[in-house]
């Protein structure tokens, strides 16, 4: 009897989770801790962790084509982008659908430690108000793993531009990195 009640509760909980959270849970279930799992066999690393370098390079090249384009609040087209509109537009070009909010995008993929970020990963930041802990900004990493982290994003002041995570402004606001692209 208790088993049926528990099973019903679990099924109801899963049915009512937002779709993005369900997808995030699937990622976590399938590849939980694989970033830190240097103990995996080489075959497992190739199957689940090794990203397509060609896709990552192409994504960064494509993102750079929009350099200098103006910022537009709520924008998600070549007429102007906000930060999440830019990242969702770029990833959509490679067949990955992301929501048009930075907090929504932060639910996708798997967490990546700062030292293991690579091209094509997403970086998330607090908004301009440091008192809020919620995510308010997103960008795409354009540097290689192990290099100082550079990212391309839509800045309210200058539009699409490249910045360094080591700059004071972004270092203080950094929340987490996420890996979306898998081979």
Image (tube, rainbow, N blue to C red):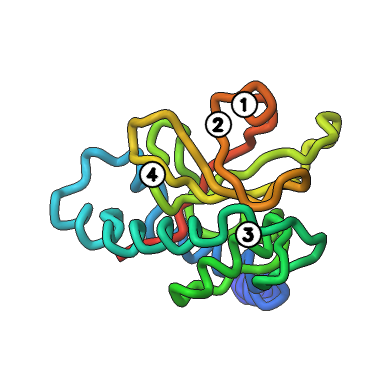
Horizontally, residue 75 falls left or right of residue 163, namely right
Q: Nearer the viewer, mark 2 or mark 3?
A: 2
Q: Is residue 138 above or below residue 62?
A: above
Q: Which residue is mark 3?
A: 105
Q: Which mark is residue 114?
A: none
28 and 71: which is toward the camera: 71
Give the alpha-carbon distance from disc 4 to disc 1, as whole Å. 17 Å
Question: Looking at the image, which is closer to me, 56 or 130?
Answer: 56
The disc label shown at residue 165, or none: 2
- The residue singled out by tag 1 in the image is 171
Mark 1 residue crowding within 10 angstroms, few (<14) / some (14–19) / many (20+): few
22 displayed left or right of 100: left
Horizontal arrangement in the rendering, residue 71 relative to residue 6 (left or right) = right
Q: Is residue 163 above or below residue 34?
A: above
Q: CA distance from mark 2 to mark 4?
A: 13 Å
Label 4 near label 2: C-beta < 8 Å?
no
Tell me the residue that label 4 is attached to. 118
The residue that appears at 69% across and 27% down in the rendered structure is 169
SS at mark 4 in the image: loop
- Coordinates of residue 37 in the picture (x, y in percent): 30, 41
Element marked by disc 1: helix
Q: Are marks 4 and 3 in contact (CB under 8 Å)?
A: no
Residue 160 visible somewhere in the drawing: yes
Q: Nearer the viewer, residue 50 or 61?
A: 61
């Amino acid at each position: 009897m208790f088993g049926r009640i528990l099973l019903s509760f679990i099924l109801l909980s899963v049915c009512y989770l937002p779709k993005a959270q369900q997808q995030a849970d699937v990622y976590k279930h399938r590849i939980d801790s694989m970033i830190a799992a240097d103990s995996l066999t080489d075959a497992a690393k190739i199957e689940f962790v090794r990203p397509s370098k060609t896709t990552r390079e192409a994504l960064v090249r494509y993102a750079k084509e929009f350099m200098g384009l103006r910022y537009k609040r709520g924008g998600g087209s070549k007429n102007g982008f906000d930060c999440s509109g830019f990242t969702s537009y770029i990833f959509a070009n490679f067949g990955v659908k992301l929501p048009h909010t930075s907090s929504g995008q932060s639910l996708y993929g798997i967490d990546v430690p700062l030292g293991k970020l690579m091209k094509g990963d997403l970086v998330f930041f607090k908004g301009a108000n440091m008192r809020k802990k919620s995510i308010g900004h997103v960008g795409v990493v354009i540097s290689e793993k192990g290099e100082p982290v550079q990212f391309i994003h839509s800045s309210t002041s200058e539009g699409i531009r490249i910045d360094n995570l080591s700059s004071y402004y972004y270092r203080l606001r950094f929340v987490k990195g996420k890996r979306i692209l898998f081979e």
